[in-house]
């Protein structure tokens, strides 16, 4: 990983380049410098020797010059040449002077004549090799322009220079290897640290937060690492807070009864909760960014949101949904002023049930007035008739009074039932629930309606009355059973039958069935018979003293006991009311 990293390669290449350049420069400068140094020191040596030999030379006899040169050359370990002012070689340590040409034009000789000292490095024709020459003017035989020349072969010099260069090279290579090692180590650790910082930074916003934090190191990268550490803590806190807030918001929105819908300014859904999808009957969850038109077919809602987006003003409106089930909604829509994603939000209150309750309440008041008006009108009418003289009408006065009494009883029944209903609906705490024996309650109810059954010629019996207990209000449960039995007897025919069965049902339930072979209920009326004042046949019900409130009371009581009631009925054949309660 580190070796393939671009920064590692760059750092190492730059370091290598710098090292190579330094070495080249070193060689470039030091090479000629050492060569010069060497030449200078050789020349210095030759100069010293020359000065010594110059002193000796003055005492040498002309005939001895050649010998002296040979002997002096051996001593000085250099080539020694003596040249007269005209350039004729008088003695040479390494060559026979007879065969030597005139040396007047040699550069070092010419220089020596000009400046008393001359030097040159060149190829010696005489010896056929490169030599370093040094020539000085010397006094000989009263003349001051004899030349004493000393020379050393350049091979030695070259060898010396080469040795110096080799040593420089060796040292440089050693330094280069060390430098490369250091550069490699530095690049490696640097790259590794940069990589670690990068991985850390990338993980900051990832699902798995980086742990442990970056180690503290005393340089800029270390400082950057510490900044990232601090940032990571802040980001973690922020992410945690945001996810907590979003979780809270999600759960609030999900558990809200009201539907919530948010759209962006191009009418694409950005959010909606499950209540919304239920209210408008659309799928859930909704993919973010779905055009609203593809989700719902509610032009009114669509138009409303469009207006809010256009005007930037909140709106409140009642809408009727066009879906299969009739639903009435109160929609509150407001603009969403987000700088990044402006849009609109709508909150939908389902007021269908509220409207229905309101209607029921209105109907109820109307029904109560209507139900009361009939007996009151009758009582008033017959009382007036009696006062107007019918009191003396021996044939009718008693009948009229009985009619008045019957209506008074009906009024009494209605007010008694209404009282029970209002007490049940008031939500006032009832009597402390007690254990009730179902069998005892059924038997007590059977006894209550026994006389009525006999009068109407209806057979009444209890079948398989099991021993079971339920929790609740004994009086109310008996009332339920009496109401159901009373209906079964009332809406029956002479010779018909009414019976009660109690059985255990699955889920720890007790099932009480009140069945009759009576007139039955038309199937279209079945769903409505539990409504207040609902009577299938008003005339017949009234004739038997019904108020239309009995089954409402039954349903209320059963539901208060957390039970259920349902009806199975066949017109002309009979009905079955099935009550299920939890057994204890
Ligand atoms: P009511 O006081 O008229 O009996 P209920 O609320 O008890 O009022 O019953 C509502 C209506 O349901 C009755 O008027 C009757 O038409 C019908 N009903 C109730 N029980 C039976 C039954 N066992 N057989 C036939 N119809 C019944």
Image: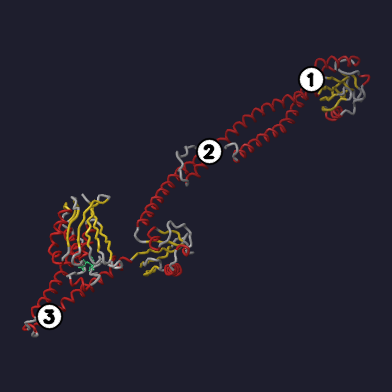
For the residue carrying disc 3, how many other residues have a C-alpha within 10 Å: few (<14), some (14-19), or many (20+)?
A: many
Q: In this view, does 105 lie to the left or right of 170?
A: right
Q: Can residue 16 be seen?
A: yes
Compared with residue 98, is residue 251 higher up or lower down, i.e. above or below?
Answer: below
Q: Mark 2 points at which residue?
A: 193
Q: Nearer the viewer, mark 3 or mark 1?
A: 3
Q: Are the residues tagged 3 and 1 within 8 Å (C-beta)?
A: no
Mark 3 or mark 1, earlier in chain: 1
**Residue 68's spot in the image, x, y percent?**
86, 15
**Residue 384's spot in the image, x, y percent?**
11, 82
For the residue carrying disc 1, how many other residues have a C-alpha within 10 Å: few (<14), some (14-19), or many (20+)?
A: some
- Element under label 2? helix
Tell me the CA gap for discs 2 and 1: 65 Å
**Residue 395's spot in the image, x, y percent?**
8, 81
Tell me what residue is drawn at x 87 percent, y 22 percent: 127
Q: Nearer the viewer, residue 302 or 185?
A: 302
Q: Nearer the viewer, residue 60 or 373?
A: 373
Circle number at residue 382:
3
- Element under label 3? helix
Tell me the CA gap for discs 2 and 3: 109 Å
Q: Which quarter of the figure has residue 577?
A: bottom left
Q: Is residue 260 left or right of residue 569?
A: right
Q: Nearer the viewer, mark 2 or mark 3?
A: 3
Q: Can residue 134 be seen?
A: no
Compared with residue 437, is residue 352 higher up or lower down, i.e. above or below?
Answer: below
Compared with residue 236, is residue 278 higher up or lower down, i.e. above or below?
Answer: below
The residue most toward the bottom is 388
Q: Name the residue under label 1.
A: 49
């Amino acid at each position: 990983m580190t070796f393939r990293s671009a920064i590692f390669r760059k750092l190492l290449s730059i370091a290598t380049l710098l090292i190579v350049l330094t070495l080249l420069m070193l060689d470039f400068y030091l090479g000629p410098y050492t060569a010069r140094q060497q030449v200078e020191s050789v020349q210095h040596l030759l100069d010293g020797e020359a000065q010594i030999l110059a002193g000796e030379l003055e005492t040498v006899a002309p005939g001895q010059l050649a010998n002296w040169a040979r002997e002096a050359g051996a001593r000085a370990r250099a080539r020694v040449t003596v040249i007269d002012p005209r350039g004729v070689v008088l003695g040479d340590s390494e060559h026979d002077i007879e065969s030597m040409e005139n040396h007047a034009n040699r550069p070092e000789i010419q220089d020596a004549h000009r400046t008393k000292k001359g030097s040159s490095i060149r190829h010696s024709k005489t010896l056929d090799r490169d030599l370093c020459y040094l020539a000085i003017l010397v006094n000989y035989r009263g003349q001051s322009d004899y030349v004493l020349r000393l020379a050393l072969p350049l091979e030695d010099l070259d060898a010396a220079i080469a040795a110096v260069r080799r040593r420089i090279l060796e040292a440089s290579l050693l330094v280069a290897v060390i430098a490369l090692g250091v550069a490699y180590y530095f690049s490696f650790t640097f790259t590794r640290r940069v990589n670690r910082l990068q991985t850390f930074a990338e993980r900051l916003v990832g699902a798995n937060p980086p742990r442990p934090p970056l180690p503290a190191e005393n340089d800029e990268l270390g400082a950057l690492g510490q900044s990232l550490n601090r940032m990571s803590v802040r980001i973690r806190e922020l992410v945690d807070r945001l996810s907590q807030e979003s979780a809270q918001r999600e759960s609030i929105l999900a558990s809200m009864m009201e539907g919530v819908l948010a759209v962006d300014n191009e009418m694409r859904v950005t959010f909606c909760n499950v209540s919304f999808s239920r209210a408008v009957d659309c799928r859930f969850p909704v993919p973010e960014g779905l055009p609203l038109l593809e989700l719902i077919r509610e032009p009114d809602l669509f138009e409303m949101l469009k207006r809010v987006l256009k005007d930037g003003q909140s709106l409140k409106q009642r809408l009727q949904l066009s879906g299969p089930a009739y639903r009435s909604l109160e929609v509150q829509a407001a603009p969403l002023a987000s700088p990044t994603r402006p849009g609109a939000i709508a909150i939908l209150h389902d007021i269908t049930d509220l409207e229905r309750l309101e209607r029921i309440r209105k109907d109820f008041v109307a029904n109560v007035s209507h139900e009361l008006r009939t007996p009151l009108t009758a009582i008033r009418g017959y009382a007036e008739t009696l006062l107007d003289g019918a009191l003396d009408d021996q044939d009718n006065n008693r009948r009229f009074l009985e009619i008045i009494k019957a209506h008074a009883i009906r009024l009494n029944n209605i007010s008694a039932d209404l009282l029970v209903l209002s007490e049940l609906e008031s939500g006032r705490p009832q009597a402390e629930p007690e254990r009730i024996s179902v069998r005892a309650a059924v038997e007590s109810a059977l006894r209550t309606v026994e006389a009525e059954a006999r009068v109407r010629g209806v057979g009444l019996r209890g079948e398989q009355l099991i021993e079971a207990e339920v929790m609740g209000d004994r009086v109310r449960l008996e009332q339920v059973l009496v109401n159901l039995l009373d209906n079964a007897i009332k809406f029956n025919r002479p010779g018909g039958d009414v019976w009660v069965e109690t059985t255990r049902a699955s889920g720890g339930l007790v099932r009480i069935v009140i069945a009759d072979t009576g007139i039955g209920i038309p199937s279209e009326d079945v769903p409505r018979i539990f409504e207040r004042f609902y009577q299938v046949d008003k005339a017949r019900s009234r004739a038997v003293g019904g108020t239309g409130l009995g089954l409402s009371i039954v349903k209320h009581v059963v539901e208060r006991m957390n039970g259920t009631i349902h009806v199975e009925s066949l017109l002309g054949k009979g009905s079955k009311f099935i009550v299920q309660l939890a057994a204890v």
